[in-house]
Image: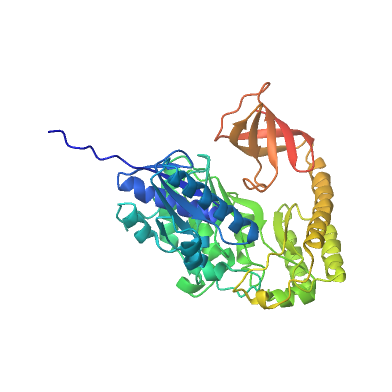
């Protein structure tokens, strides 16, 4: 008598939101692989795990739409199971269970062992640093801490991610060594707040010491800093950046606004004068540094005068990289008690005006690069171009260096010296030089 063969599940992990979610998905996939499960990232599979984002309105909408899309596939019989994890289900689990009941199970941001159990796998504690990377082979994200202790009025991250928790230096070095062994050459350090690193474990801000340990990892050539908070910035980080060639002359420091009334209401713990001085100190310590920031316009109570202060300041500071978001009114945040009084079209208009100013600055700064040669890492080939980045550019958010693939050949994953021949607002064009 023939026995019925058990169907082998193929688990498809779908990632939405920020690089911190990318990292979490990679850890999940590493655990599943260690349990001998077949796992893919955003390909076809009969079991789907959606790692959601719940940060602002647009992200929540995308997450909900993605859940609905896969639930429809389940109802049509195209897939067997749908599981939801990440920030959205941490924040809205009861609502989601009620509104979209056809999901098999919802999990929060720190529910990995339970999620694995639901997928027929065991959580393996010994797998520190083992993950299936989904980024191009030459770079990987390194999450150095989880959660956030900052009281920013507009931000729901502490609700979804909890208190700040640093990872020990030796654990991060071990993880980096494993990544380097796989061919990773660039580490992108991420956390909700890099500058808080170590306060819980070592009773002091310890980012500089972590960097000193990471530069010793063989095979890692670039280390990039993302999401540094301006208040209480540990200035010894700049000394290490200047001294160690592996640390990119680059920092991502989300400043959000500059008008004092708005900074106060946002509970940012700083002022226009202090922030401006901090940036001048950055430039004095590391003159070649690229500074990336992000801003929010349309925050409750933002007057035309506040906005003008911000716009003038952006023109004055000449950031190399800048993104601008419209304010999203998020329940359970401190700012939710304020009246969301800036109309949507005014928010959008203000964001457009900031980006127009930035576009001109970016164009001017890019023109200065023509004729110069930069070390670039080649991420991928797209159409007729090889696409690379300088040390001044992070993947997905910053400028790219385009090399004509019909004329030149370079290898993806390699570092190449590139002479810049042309420049637009946000892209550089160049040719490889020996």
In the rendered view of the protein, which quadrant contains the C terminus? top right
Residue 389: where, in percent of width, then height? 65, 41
Residue sitting nearer the eye, 47 or 355: 47
Residue 168: where, in percent of width, then height? 43, 64
Tell me: residue 48, above or below residue 306.
above
User: Looking at the image, can residue 147 be seen?
Assistant: no
Q: Quadrant of residue 322?
A: bottom right
Q: Quadrant of residue 152?
A: bottom right
Tell me: residue 313, above or below residue 39.
below
* Residue drawn at 32 percent across, 47 percent down: 34
Residue 405: where, in percent of width, then height? 65, 25
In the rendered view of the protein, which quadrant contains the N terminus? top left
Tell me: residue 99, above or below residue 270.
above
Colour logic: rainbow
Q: Quadrant of residue 233?
A: bottom right
User: Looking at the image, can residue 221 be seen?
Assistant: yes
* Residue drawn at 87 percent across, 65 percent down: 308
| Left or right of 139 in this view: 281 | right
């Amino acid at each position: 008598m023939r026995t019925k063969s058990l169907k082998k599940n193929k688990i498809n992990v779908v990632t939405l939101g920020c690089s911190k979610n990318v990292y979490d998905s990679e850890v999940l996939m590493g655990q599943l692989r260690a349990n001998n499960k077949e796992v893919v990232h955003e390909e076809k599979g009969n079991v789907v795990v959606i790692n959601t984002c719940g940060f602002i309105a647009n992200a929540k909408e995308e997450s909900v739409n993605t859940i609905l899309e896969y639930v429809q596939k389940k109802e049509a019989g195209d897939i067997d199971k749908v599981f939801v994890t990440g920030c959205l289900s941490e924040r809205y689990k009861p609502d989601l269970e009620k509104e979209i009941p056809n999901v098999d199970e919802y999990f929060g941001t720190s529910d990995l062992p339970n999620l694995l159990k639901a997928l027929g796998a065991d959580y393996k504690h010994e797998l520190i640093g083992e993950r299936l990377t989904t980024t191009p082979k030459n770079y990987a994200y390194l999450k150095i801490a989880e959660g956030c202790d900052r009281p920013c009025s507009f931000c729901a991250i502490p609700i979804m991610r909890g208190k700040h928790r640093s990872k020990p230096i030796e654990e991060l070095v071990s993880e980096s060594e494993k990544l380097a062994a796989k061919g990773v050459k660039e580490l992108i350090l991420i956390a909700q707040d890099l500058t808080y690193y170590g306060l819980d474990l070592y009773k002091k801000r310890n980012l500089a010491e972590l960097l000193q340990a990471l530069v010793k990892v063989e095979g890692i050539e670039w280390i990039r800093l993302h999401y540094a908070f301006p208040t209480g910035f540990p200035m010894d980080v700049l000394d290490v950046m200047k001294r160690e060639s592996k640390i990119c002359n680059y920092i991502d420091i989300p400043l959000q606004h500059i008008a004092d009334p708005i900074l106060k209401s946002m509970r940012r713990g700083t002022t226009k004068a202090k922030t401006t001085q901090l940036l001048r100190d950055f430039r004095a310590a590391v003159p070649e540094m690229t500074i990336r920031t992000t801003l929010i316009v349309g925050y409750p109570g933002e007057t035309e005068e506040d906005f003008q202060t911000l716009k003038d300041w952006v023109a004055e500071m000449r950031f190399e990289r800048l993104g601008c978001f419209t304010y999203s009114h998020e329940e359970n945040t401190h700012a939710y008690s304020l009246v969301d009084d800036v109309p949507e079209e005014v928010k959008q208009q203000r964001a457009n005006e900031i980006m127009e100013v930035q576009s001109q600055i970016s164009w001017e700064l890019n023109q200065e690069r023509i004729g110069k040669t930069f070390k670039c890492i080649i991420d991928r080939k797209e159409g007729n171009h090889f696409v690379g980045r300088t040390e001044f550019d992070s993947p997905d958010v910053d400028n790219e260096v385009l090399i004509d693939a019909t004329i030149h050949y370079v290898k993806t994953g390699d570092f190449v010296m590139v002479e810049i021949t042309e420049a637009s607002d946000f892209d550089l064009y160049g040719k490889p030089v020996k």
